[in-house]
Amino acid sequence: MDTSSEKEKAIALLQKYKAGLCTPEETARVRQWYDSFEDLSDNLNAKDVQLAADKAAHQTLNKLFGENNTHQPGGKKASLVYTLLRVAACLIVVCTLYLMVGKFKKAQPNLITYSKYSTRKGERREIQLSDGSVITLNAASTIQIASDFGVKKRAVLLQGEAFFQVSKDKTRPFIIKTGKIQTRVVGTSFNINAYADENSVSVAVATGKVQVEKEDAKGKTLIGRDLTHNYLLVYDLKKDNYRQTLADADLLSAWKINKLVFNQTSITQIVRILERSYNVHVVLIGKPRKPGLYTVTFDNYSLDKLLPLLADLSGITYKLKKQQLIMNIQNCR
């Protein structure tokens, strides 16, 4: 084996790991090596040190006195030298070992991991965070909490919809990332809708102040400064623009109490919400001849009770069988 070549490869791999450029396989190799080395330092006992020290002292005496004189050192001077060398070698072995472990620990990047909480269709969930904040997840949603949550900031990732009640802390901002949109607060309550199958991300403020930013390759752009009670910001993902308007934040987050509120909503968007809320698979037939927008509220209705009312309002026809809803939307008005 070419030890020089192996050494160069090992150094190159560690440099690559420190820069955060390793593949998953390379990262696993480095961590496995580190774990075994750390185990060695943790389990090191006096016998191990003594053996290593004797070997180092023996090699040094070979150079000083010749191989024949090292097995049975003659005279007090040689014996004293041998003893001193053993002590020095022992210190070198221990110090070198711990210095290497310490340097490697410092070289490791701080990897941020996330704890994931999800809801299925037809399910809602309340999550209590370590800072006292409360997140209520709507159906078919996921929230991810960063492992460094609460250290310098409070960062989470959201897919879907959630209502946030954030504990006030001016020193550690609370940041919600939803794709390219980032919502930043210090202590407030608000609703965020960011489902992957929708064309927009919306932020509705119930209390306090909220700041909304757009982040892309060019950097961050502030698109909503100090939004307050009943302000709604809607960012259009396709058109890459946004609008701010006044809205009833309580109605927009009324899903928390099993109330579905539709305000100038298309039939296709209503269908997506019904799928998520009632855990039903919807099969659409046809296209609306005259697309309409509908305003209606369903207060804690079962699907069986809701559908006839929706049919009277919109002109749809439907057939519900177990968890499948076949809906004809050709005659929507």
Image (cartoon, helix red, strand yellow):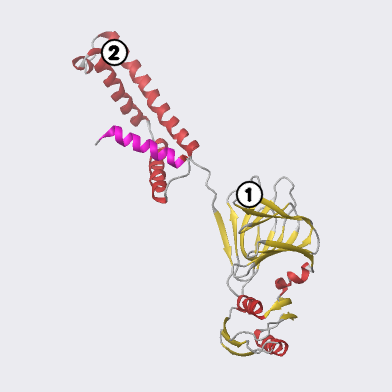
Q: CA distance from mark 1 to mark 2?
A: 70 Å
User: For mark 2, what is the residue?
Assistant: 79
Looking at the figure, which quarter contains the C terminus? bottom right
Near-viewer residue (6 or 231):
231
Q: Position of residue 162 (x, y in %)?
A: 67, 65
Relative vertical location of residue 322 with respect to residue 121 in this rendering, above or below: below
Quarter of the figure with residue 128: bottom right
Q: Horizontal placement of 301 versus 208: left or right?
A: left
Q: Amino acid at mark 1?
A: Gly
Tell me which segment is drawn in magenta: 2-17
Relative vertical location of residue 249 with respect to residue 32 in this rendering, above or below: below
Badge 1 element: strand
Badge 2 element: helix
Q: Horizontal placement of 84 versus 276: left or right?
A: left
Answer whether residue 229 is magenta in the image.
Answer: no
The reply to whether residue 215 is visible in this rendering is yes
User: For mark 1, what is the residue?
Assistant: 219
Q: Which mark is residue 211?
A: none
Please tell me which residue is depicted at 28% across the width and 33% down the height of the picture.
Answer: 3
Q: Nearer the viewer, mark 1 or mark 2?
A: 1
Q: Horizontal placement of 11 versus 138: left or right?
A: left
Sort mark 2 into few (<14), some (14-19) or many (20+) by Cα contacts within 10 Å.
some
Q: Position of residue 233 (x, y in %)?
A: 74, 62
The reply to whether residue 162 is visible in this rendering is no
